[in-house]
Protein backbone atom coordinates (compact mmCIF):
# COMPACT_ATOMS: atom_id res chain seq x y z
CA UNK A 1 0.00 0.00 0.00
CA UNK A 2 1.60 3.27 -1.12
CA UNK A 3 0.02 5.57 1.44
CA UNK A 4 2.56 8.40 1.30
CA UNK A 5 1.64 10.35 -1.80
CA UNK A 6 -1.10 7.85 -2.64
CA UNK A 7 -4.84 8.26 -2.35
CA UNK A 8 -5.68 7.14 1.18
CA UNK A 9 -9.47 6.64 1.21
CA UNK A 10 -12.11 5.66 3.79
CA UNK A 11 -13.76 2.66 2.16
CA UNK A 12 -16.88 1.02 3.53
CA UNK A 13 -16.30 -2.54 2.32
CA UNK A 14 -19.58 -3.79 3.67
CA UNK A 15 -21.85 -3.15 6.64
CA UNK A 16 -19.68 -2.77 9.76
CA UNK A 17 -16.35 -2.89 7.90
CA UNK A 18 -14.70 0.48 7.32
CA UNK A 19 -11.06 0.41 6.17
CA UNK A 20 -8.44 2.91 5.07
CA UNK A 21 -6.94 1.88 1.75
CA UNK A 22 -5.15 3.30 -1.22
CA UNK A 23 -7.36 3.89 -4.29
CA UNK A 24 -6.34 5.19 -7.73
CA UNK A 25 -5.88 8.97 -8.00
CA UNK A 26 -8.65 10.05 -10.40
CA UNK A 27 -7.87 12.36 -13.35
CA UNK A 28 -10.33 15.18 -14.05
CA UNK A 29 -12.48 14.65 -17.14
CA UNK A 30 -14.01 17.36 -19.31
CA UNK A 31 -15.58 20.11 -17.14
CA UNK A 32 -14.23 18.49 -13.97
CA UNK A 33 -11.59 19.43 -11.42
CA UNK A 34 -9.34 17.25 -9.29
CA UNK A 35 -9.40 18.33 -5.65
CA UNK A 36 -6.85 17.74 -2.89
CA UNK A 37 -9.37 17.14 -0.11
CA UNK A 38 -8.93 19.14 3.10
CA UNK A 39 -11.99 18.69 5.32
CA UNK A 40 -14.78 16.11 5.23
CA UNK A 41 -17.59 16.10 7.79
CA UNK A 42 -19.16 12.87 9.03
CA UNK A 43 -22.89 12.90 8.31
CA UNK A 44 -25.48 10.80 10.12
CA UNK A 45 -25.92 8.98 6.79
CA UNK A 46 -22.23 7.92 6.68
CA UNK A 47 -22.64 6.41 10.15
CA UNK A 48 -25.94 4.81 9.13
CA UNK A 49 -24.37 3.13 6.07
CA UNK A 50 -21.56 1.82 8.30
CA UNK A 51 -23.94 0.44 10.93
CA UNK A 52 -26.82 -0.77 8.75
CA UNK A 53 -25.43 -1.07 5.20
CA UNK A 54 -28.44 0.73 3.76
CA UNK A 55 -30.76 3.71 3.94
CA UNK A 56 -34.19 2.93 2.51
CA UNK A 57 -33.70 1.58 -1.00
CA UNK A 58 -30.04 2.71 -1.16
CA UNK A 59 -28.09 -0.44 -0.34
CA UNK A 60 -24.30 -0.83 -0.06
CA UNK A 61 -23.73 -3.73 -2.48
CA UNK A 62 -20.11 -2.96 -3.40
CA UNK A 63 -17.27 -1.20 -1.52
CA UNK A 64 -18.01 2.53 -1.31
CA UNK A 65 -15.86 5.49 -0.25
CA UNK A 66 -17.78 7.52 2.40
CA UNK A 67 -18.11 11.28 2.81
CA UNK A 68 -20.04 14.11 1.18
CA UNK A 69 -19.67 17.20 3.43
CA UNK A 70 -16.44 18.48 2.02
CA UNK A 71 -13.99 21.13 0.95
CA UNK A 72 -10.57 21.11 -0.67
CA UNK A 73 -8.01 22.79 -2.92
CA UNK A 74 -8.13 22.43 -6.69
CA UNK A 75 -5.09 20.39 -7.76
CA UNK A 76 -5.82 19.88 -11.47
CA UNK A 77 -8.25 21.42 -13.91
CA UNK A 78 -9.95 19.43 -16.69
CA UNK A 79 -10.66 20.54 -20.24
CA UNK A 80 -13.26 23.27 -20.55
CA UNK A 81 -13.09 24.56 -16.97
CA UNK A 82 -12.93 28.36 -17.00
CA UNK A 83 -13.87 29.58 -13.52
CA UNK A 84 -11.43 27.59 -11.34
CA UNK A 85 -7.65 27.38 -11.17
CA UNK A 86 -5.12 25.18 -9.42
CA UNK A 87 -4.85 26.43 -5.82
CA UNK A 88 -8.43 27.67 -5.49
CA UNK A 89 -10.11 26.68 -2.23
CA UNK A 90 -13.57 25.27 -2.90
CA UNK A 91 -16.70 23.96 -1.19
CA UNK A 92 -18.20 20.95 -2.94
CA UNK A 93 -21.91 20.52 -3.63
CA UNK A 94 -22.03 16.71 -3.63
CA UNK A 95 -25.05 15.95 -5.84
CA UNK A 96 -24.51 16.30 -9.59
CA UNK A 97 -27.71 15.97 -11.66
CA UNK A 98 -28.13 15.00 -15.32
CA UNK A 99 -28.81 18.61 -16.44
CA UNK A 100 -31.13 17.27 -19.20
CA UNK A 101 -34.41 16.22 -17.59
CA UNK A 102 -37.45 18.39 -16.85
CA UNK A 103 -36.51 18.70 -13.15
CA UNK A 104 -33.04 19.93 -14.06
CA UNK A 105 -34.47 22.37 -16.60
CA UNK A 106 -37.03 23.65 -14.06
CA UNK A 107 -34.19 24.39 -11.62
CA UNK A 108 -35.28 21.75 -9.10
CA UNK A 109 -32.29 19.67 -10.04
CA UNK A 110 -32.17 17.90 -6.65
CA UNK A 111 -35.28 15.98 -7.79
CA UNK A 112 -33.47 14.69 -10.91
CA UNK A 113 -33.88 10.90 -10.95
CA UNK A 114 -30.33 10.48 -12.26
CA UNK A 115 -28.51 12.63 -9.69
CA UNK A 116 -25.08 11.27 -8.75
CA UNK A 117 -24.66 11.97 -5.05
CA UNK A 118 -21.39 11.36 -3.21
CA UNK A 119 -21.44 8.39 -0.86
CA UNK A 120 -24.93 7.28 -1.81
CA UNK A 121 -24.71 3.78 -3.32
CA UNK A 122 -23.50 3.02 -5.93
CA UNK A 123 -21.44 6.26 -6.02
CA UNK A 124 -18.23 6.87 -4.13
CA UNK A 125 -17.82 9.80 -1.75
CA UNK A 126 -15.06 12.29 -1.04
CA UNK A 127 -13.39 11.03 2.17
CA UNK A 128 -10.03 10.51 0.46
CA UNK A 129 -6.95 12.49 -0.47
CA UNK A 130 -7.83 13.13 -4.11
CA UNK A 131 -11.27 13.35 -5.63
CA UNK A 132 -12.70 14.65 -8.92
CA UNK A 133 -15.96 16.56 -9.21
CA UNK A 134 -18.03 18.54 -11.73
CA UNK A 135 -16.43 21.99 -11.73
CA UNK A 136 -19.78 23.81 -11.75
CA UNK A 137 -20.65 22.10 -8.44
CA UNK A 138 -17.48 23.45 -6.81
CA UNK A 139 -17.71 26.92 -5.27
CA UNK A 140 -14.66 29.11 -4.79
CA UNK A 141 -14.40 30.32 -1.19
CA UNK A 142 -13.96 33.93 -0.18
CA UNK A 143 -10.82 34.42 1.96
CA UNK A 144 -12.77 34.81 5.21
CA UNK A 145 -14.43 31.37 4.94
CA UNK A 146 -12.39 28.55 6.47
CA UNK A 147 -12.17 25.05 5.00
CA UNK A 148 -14.03 23.70 8.07
CA UNK A 149 -16.86 26.16 7.49
CA UNK A 150 -16.84 25.28 3.79
CA UNK A 151 -17.34 21.57 4.52
CA UNK A 152 -20.32 22.44 6.74
CA UNK A 153 -22.01 24.46 4.01
CA UNK A 154 -23.49 21.13 2.88
CA UNK A 155 -25.59 20.45 6.01
CA UNK A 156 -26.27 24.19 6.31
CA UNK A 157 -27.84 24.02 2.84
CA UNK A 158 -30.42 21.54 4.17
CA UNK A 159 -31.50 24.13 6.75
CA UNK A 160 -31.57 26.94 4.19
CA UNK A 161 -33.65 24.82 1.82
CA UNK A 162 -36.08 23.78 4.59
CA UNK A 163 -36.65 27.44 5.47
CA UNK A 164 -37.16 28.37 1.81
CA UNK A 165 -39.69 25.53 1.45
CA UNK A 166 -41.44 26.91 4.54
CA UNK A 167 -41.40 30.41 3.06
CA UNK A 168 -40.03 31.89 6.28
CA UNK A 169 -40.24 35.64 6.34
CA UNK A 170 -39.80 38.62 8.67
CA UNK A 171 -41.33 38.42 12.12
CA UNK A 172 -42.54 34.83 11.99
CA UNK A 173 -42.49 32.40 14.88
CA UNK A 174 -40.91 29.04 14.15
CA UNK A 175 -40.90 25.68 15.91
CA UNK A 176 -38.04 23.32 15.17
CA UNK A 177 -38.46 19.74 16.39
CA UNK A 178 -35.18 17.99 17.16
CA UNK A 179 -31.97 19.82 18.11
CA UNK A 180 -29.46 17.67 16.23
CA UNK A 181 -27.15 19.20 13.61
CA UNK A 182 -29.98 19.55 11.09
CA UNK A 183 -32.30 21.20 13.62
CA UNK A 184 -29.51 23.62 14.54
CA UNK A 185 -28.73 24.66 10.96
CA UNK A 186 -32.48 25.09 10.35
CA UNK A 187 -32.65 27.36 13.41
CA UNK A 188 -29.69 29.45 12.18
CA UNK A 189 -31.27 29.71 8.71
CA UNK A 190 -34.71 30.66 10.10
CA UNK A 191 -33.20 33.47 12.12
CA UNK A 192 -31.14 34.67 9.17
CA UNK A 193 -34.33 34.78 7.07
CA UNK A 194 -36.08 37.00 9.58
CA UNK A 195 -37.85 34.71 12.05
CA UNK A 196 -38.54 36.72 15.20
CA UNK A 197 -38.60 33.80 17.63
CA UNK A 198 -37.52 30.19 17.28
CA UNK A 199 -38.44 27.48 19.79
CA UNK A 200 -36.72 24.09 19.65
CA UNK A 201 -37.70 20.73 21.13
CA UNK A 202 -35.65 17.66 21.98
CA UNK A 203 -35.62 14.73 24.40
CA UNK A 204 -32.05 15.54 25.39
CA UNK A 205 -31.29 18.51 27.66
CA UNK A 206 -27.67 18.71 26.45
CA UNK A 207 -28.84 19.22 22.89
CA UNK A 208 -31.26 21.91 24.04
CA UNK A 209 -28.47 23.70 25.92
CA UNK A 210 -26.47 23.75 22.65
CA UNK A 211 -29.53 25.12 20.83
CA UNK A 212 -29.85 27.99 23.33
CA UNK A 213 -26.11 28.68 23.08
CA UNK A 214 -26.45 28.93 19.28
CA UNK A 215 -29.42 31.29 19.39
CA UNK A 216 -32.73 29.45 19.92
CA UNK A 217 -35.12 31.86 21.66
CA UNK A 218 -36.78 29.11 23.74
CA UNK A 219 -36.39 25.38 24.20
CA UNK A 220 -38.91 22.78 25.33
CA UNK A 221 -37.80 19.41 26.68
CA UNK A 222 -40.12 16.67 25.43
CA UNK A 223 -41.14 14.76 28.55
CA UNK A 224 -44.64 13.61 27.66
CA UNK A 225 -45.69 10.82 25.31
CA UNK A 226 -48.83 12.83 24.44
CA UNK A 227 -48.10 15.07 21.41
CA UNK A 228 -50.97 17.40 22.35
CA UNK A 229 -49.35 18.11 25.72
CA UNK A 230 -45.99 18.83 24.06
CA UNK A 231 -47.78 21.14 21.59
CA UNK A 232 -49.34 23.01 24.54
CA UNK A 233 -45.91 23.38 26.16
CA UNK A 234 -44.55 24.82 22.91
CA UNK A 235 -47.48 27.22 22.67
CA UNK A 236 -46.85 28.28 26.27
CA UNK A 237 -43.16 28.96 25.63
CA UNK A 238 -43.88 30.97 22.48
CA UNK A 239 -47.02 32.75 23.73
CA UNK A 240 -48.96 31.35 20.74
CA UNK A 241 -48.79 28.58 18.16
CA UNK A 242 -45.88 28.80 15.66
CA UNK A 243 -46.47 30.04 12.09
CA UNK A 244 -44.07 27.41 10.78
CA UNK A 245 -42.83 24.07 12.11
CA UNK A 246 -39.71 22.41 10.75
CA UNK A 247 -39.64 18.78 11.86
CA UNK A 248 -36.01 17.59 12.15
CA UNK A 249 -36.24 14.47 14.32
CA UNK A 250 -38.12 11.98 12.14
CA UNK A 251 -39.77 10.59 15.28
CA UNK A 252 -43.45 9.78 14.85
CA UNK A 253 -44.64 11.48 18.09
CA UNK A 254 -42.76 14.59 17.01
CA UNK A 255 -44.44 14.60 13.58
CA UNK A 256 -47.80 14.22 15.33
CA UNK A 257 -46.90 17.15 17.57
CA UNK A 258 -45.90 19.22 14.52
CA UNK A 259 -49.33 18.64 12.95
CA UNK A 260 -51.24 19.50 16.14
CA UNK A 261 -48.95 22.30 17.21
CA UNK A 262 -48.77 24.53 14.10
CA UNK A 263 -51.01 27.59 13.78
CA UNK A 264 -54.05 27.28 11.48
CA UNK A 265 -53.03 28.35 7.98
CA UNK A 266 -49.39 27.64 8.80
CA UNK A 267 -46.80 25.32 7.30
CA UNK A 268 -45.18 22.07 8.46
CA UNK A 269 -41.97 21.12 6.71
CA UNK A 270 -40.83 17.51 7.09
CA UNK A 271 -37.04 17.21 7.09
CA UNK A 272 -36.53 14.31 9.54
CA UNK A 273 -36.62 10.87 7.98
CA UNK A 274 -38.27 8.33 10.24
CA UNK A 275 -39.97 5.07 9.31
CA UNK A 276 -41.25 4.98 5.74
CA UNK A 277 -44.82 4.57 6.95
CA UNK A 278 -46.05 6.08 10.17
CA UNK A 279 -48.94 4.45 11.98
CA UNK A 280 -51.03 7.43 13.01
CA UNK A 281 -50.82 11.04 11.97
CA UNK A 282 -53.55 13.63 12.70
CA UNK A 283 -54.08 14.43 9.01
CA UNK A 284 -57.67 15.64 9.41
CA UNK A 285 -56.74 18.00 12.23
CA UNK A 286 -54.08 19.55 9.98
CA UNK A 287 -56.28 19.53 6.86
CA UNK A 288 -59.26 21.24 8.50
CA UNK A 289 -56.99 23.98 9.78
CA UNK A 290 -55.34 24.42 6.35
CA UNK A 291 -51.90 23.52 7.63
CA UNK A 292 -49.71 22.92 4.58
CA UNK A 293 -47.42 19.88 4.82
CA UNK A 294 -44.29 20.06 2.67
CA UNK A 295 -41.44 17.67 2.08
CA UNK A 296 -37.75 18.44 1.85
CA UNK A 297 -35.14 16.55 -0.15
CA UNK A 298 -31.64 17.87 0.42
CA UNK A 299 -31.36 21.28 -1.34
CA UNK A 300 -30.91 23.05 -4.65
CA UNK A 301 -29.54 26.45 -5.59
CA UNK A 302 -28.57 27.08 -1.98
P1 LIG B 1 -29.85 13.61 14.92
O1 LIG B 1 -30.23 12.19 15.20
O2 LIG B 1 -28.50 14.09 15.37
O3 LIG B 1 -30.93 14.60 15.59
C1 LIG B 1 -32.26 14.25 15.81
C2 LIG B 1 -32.68 14.82 17.16
O4 LIG B 1 -34.07 14.58 17.35
C3 LIG B 1 -31.94 14.18 18.34
O5 LIG B 1 -31.30 15.18 19.12
C4 LIG B 1 -33.06 13.47 19.11
O6 LIG B 1 -32.86 13.50 20.52
C5 LIG B 1 -34.27 14.31 18.72
N1 LIG B 1 -35.56 13.63 18.94
C6 LIG B 1 -35.87 12.31 18.88
N2 LIG B 1 -37.17 12.11 19.19
C7 LIG B 1 -37.70 13.34 19.40
C8 LIG B 1 -39.00 13.79 19.76
N3 LIG B 1 -40.01 12.95 19.94
N4 LIG B 1 -39.20 15.13 19.90
C9 LIG B 1 -38.17 16.01 19.73
N5 LIG B 1 -36.91 15.63 19.41
C10 LIG B 1 -36.68 14.30 19.26
O7 LIG B 1 -30.02 13.80 13.37
P2 LIG B 1 -29.60 15.02 12.38
O8 LIG B 1 -28.29 14.72 11.75
O9 LIG B 1 -29.79 16.33 13.07
O10 LIG B 1 -30.71 14.83 11.26
C11 LIG B 1 -32.07 15.01 11.60
C12 LIG B 1 -32.99 14.28 10.65
O11 LIG B 1 -32.95 14.91 9.37
C13 LIG B 1 -32.63 12.80 10.41
O12 LIG B 1 -33.85 12.06 10.38
C14 LIG B 1 -32.00 12.83 9.03
O13 LIG B 1 -32.16 11.60 8.36
C15 LIG B 1 -32.81 13.91 8.36
N6 LIG B 1 -32.21 14.55 7.19
C16 LIG B 1 -33.04 14.75 6.14
C17 LIG B 1 -32.58 15.39 5.01
C18 LIG B 1 -33.51 15.62 3.88
O14 LIG B 1 -33.05 15.91 2.79
N7 LIG B 1 -34.82 15.52 4.07
C19 LIG B 1 -31.24 15.82 4.95
C20 LIG B 1 -30.41 15.61 6.05
C21 LIG B 1 -30.91 14.97 7.18
ZN1 LIG C 1 -31.97 15.67 -14.45
Image (tube, rainbow, N blue to C red):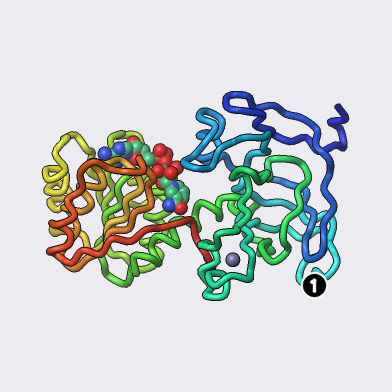
Q: Is residue 224 left or right of residue 36?
A: left
Residue at image coords 57%, 75%? 105
Q: Is mark 1 within 8 Å of ligand 2?
A: no
Q: Is residue 290 above or below residue 46?
A: below
| Image quadrant occupied by the N terminus | top right
Per the image, label 1 sits on a secondary structure element best described as: loop
Name, please, the residue furthest toward the bottom: 106
| Residue at image coords 56%, 50% | 152
For the residue pair 290 and 224, the one nearer the viewer reads as 290
- In percent of the image, x 74 and y 36: which residue is there? 9
Left or right position of 84 against 268: right
Which residue is at 64% across, 64% downward?
98
* Mark 1 Cα shell of 10 Å, populated few (<14), some (14-19), many (≥20): few
Q: Position of residue 59 (x, y in %)?
A: 55, 38
Q: Is residue 262 left or right of residue 127?
A: left
Any part of residue 242 in sight? yes
The location of residue 143, given as percent across then percent down, is 68, 62
The quadrant where residue 76 appears: bottom right
Left or right for 156, reference 162: right
For label 1, the residue is 82
Amino acid sequence: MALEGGNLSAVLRRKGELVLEDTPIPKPGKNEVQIRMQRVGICGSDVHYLQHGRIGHFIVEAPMILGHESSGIVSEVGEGVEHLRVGDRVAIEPGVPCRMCSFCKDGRYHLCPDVIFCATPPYHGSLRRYYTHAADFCFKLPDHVSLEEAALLEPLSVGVHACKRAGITLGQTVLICGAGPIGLVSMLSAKAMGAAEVVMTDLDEKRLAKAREMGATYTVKVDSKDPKIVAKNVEGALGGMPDVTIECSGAEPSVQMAFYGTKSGGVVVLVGLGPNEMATLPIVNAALREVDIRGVFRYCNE
